[in-house]
Amino acid sequence: MGGGKGVIGIFSPNDFREGVREENIDLMLRHEGLLLDFLRGEGYAVVRGGKGHDKMDSIAWNTSLVREHVRNIVDGGADVLVLNQGSWTFPYDSRDAAQYFSQLKRAGDPSSSPPVLVFAYQDTQVPGMVAGMAVAGALRRIGIPYHLVYGRIDSDQAVREKVRNLLAFYDRRREAAGRAAQVQDELHYQKYVAFGGMALKMCTTTADVDAWAKLFGISYEALDQSELTKKALSYVSWSGKPGESDPEAITDGRVSAAVESLKERCVLDFSRAKFTDTNKLIYQVSYYYAAWDLVEEYGGTFAGIKCQDELSASECTMCLATSFLSNDFGPLGEVKGVVPCACENDMDSSLTQLFLSLLSGGKSSGFGDFRDVEGDVLAIVNCGQHPPSFFGREEETAEDKLARTEFIGQEVFYHAGGAAVRGRTGGGQVMTIARLARENLRYYLVGTVLDTIEVGPEEHQRYNVSWPIIRGRVPISGEELIGLWPCNHLGFVYGDYTPHLVELAARLGIGYRIYDRHGILHEGIA
């Protein structure tokens, strides 16, 4: 995901009062020069808005000059606008510059939201930070996303490092823009298939399908969970109660082949009361193919299964179905398309998984719970349906990952039982975690990076014996993470796609609160 450096545009405003300008012009030019030197030293091409003007007009001080300078910046190919506050300036000029820059950039890409950095030179004798804060407030009032950095760019290493990290993230946003624009278009071809309604009376699992249609162009289909059961029973005939008796005949060859494959390739643990033999596994596999076929029949591309409480209480848990739907290979190890699927029919989680899968080019995207946070370490432990792609290391083969996949009896509160899909994600890998949510009914997206930690088999005893585990460090504190997150669920994918999430959310016109791997918050107001 690396690439070249973009082009930075510097807009430097000044006081409109002639006497003040004459007194501070040299200071303004010196402070602008310090920023120019730093950026060029970092290898960036820099377009100075005031280039070509005489000395007094090379720092903009009226509306006409604001527009001329911004036009110079855009004509020079700038991807990022830096509003440089060398001393006190009038915030309207910087606000107008940001608006005009965005307007001109959108002429070529109507959905774009080009980055804006407010840089304020910090000096107790010069009110540059005052100006920076006033400009930031002006931008926030009208919903223009920005970052504010203040300090001495010539000598403060922490300030230099923060600007360096921000610009690197902006470069990655620029590289991600094409993919994000493609996903924005692809969303109009997506359809959610809901199997059942609200699970466990969880408010955050439901969504307004009209809002989905309006904001994202997504279609919707609702089916009762009985449709899954009816379809699953058409694949296997049973001598008694399905899953608790011997099958008389398996009429769908995919089911029998998948069961044999899982028995051969995976670890089957029959030691727990909720999973004592392969009959329940056969039933769970038939539900997987039932869900796959129904999604295909209704033209779906992502889905959610309620599971709790009806299916998990009377038939079997849907762990295997949701796990393999979201996976990029099937029970035979065969390559297949990902159908992001959330358990508990969590619609916004499934949509988040869809975002992550599409942005990553079709990778598996999983569904998980915030099970525990200790310091900066997050444990993602869900009721038994992490996709097998996340067991071990990303680069391992499907055969390797199936060998790491364990089927073990569910916890006691799932009355009908069945196997959980258990495994552990290897350490030393980068993942993105994210969640689409609403605040006062307005959509926004949260996310950050997770650096995984090795998980040993003994750690299942710390959480739930039968459930899969991902553990990793986030770049912010646990308290900040809990404060950021809108609910108890999340989506995850291998790789750092935080720039892609920012770019997609900005293009969709929804809010976002994304922490990058350096712990810097990228925020857009819903």
Image (cartoon, rainbow, N blue to C red):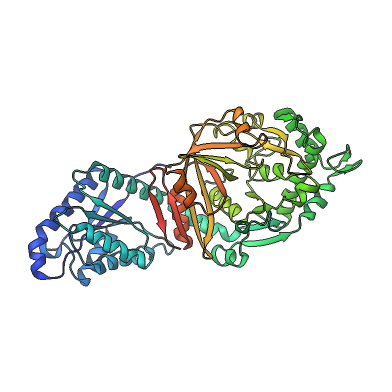
- 329 in relation to 129, above or below: above
Q: Residue at x 59, y 36 (%)?
A: 469
Q: Is residue 218 above or below residue 122?
A: below
| Residue 14 visible here | yes
Picture quadrant of residue 147: bottom left
The answer to whether 513 appears left or right of 280 in the picture is left
Q: Looking at the image, is 360 positioned above or below residue 436? A: above
Query: Observer-nearest residue: 395 or 524?
Result: 524
User: Where 129 sits versus 327, above or below?
Assistant: below
Residue 322 relative to residue 456: left or right:
right
Query: Image quarter for residue 118?
Result: bottom left
Q: Position of residue 170 (x, y in %)?
A: 36, 50
Would you say residue 43 is visible in this rendering?
no
Percent coordinates x, y for residue 187 in the rendering: 56, 58
Q: How far across and down, in percent of the image, does residue 126 sit?
A: 15, 57
The x and y percentages for residue 498 are 45, 48
Residue 291 lies left or right of residue 338; in this view the side is right
Residue under the point 25% across and 52% down? 150
Total numbered circles: 0
Of the 4 image quadrants, the one containing the N terminus is: top left
Residue at image coords 45%, 57%: 512
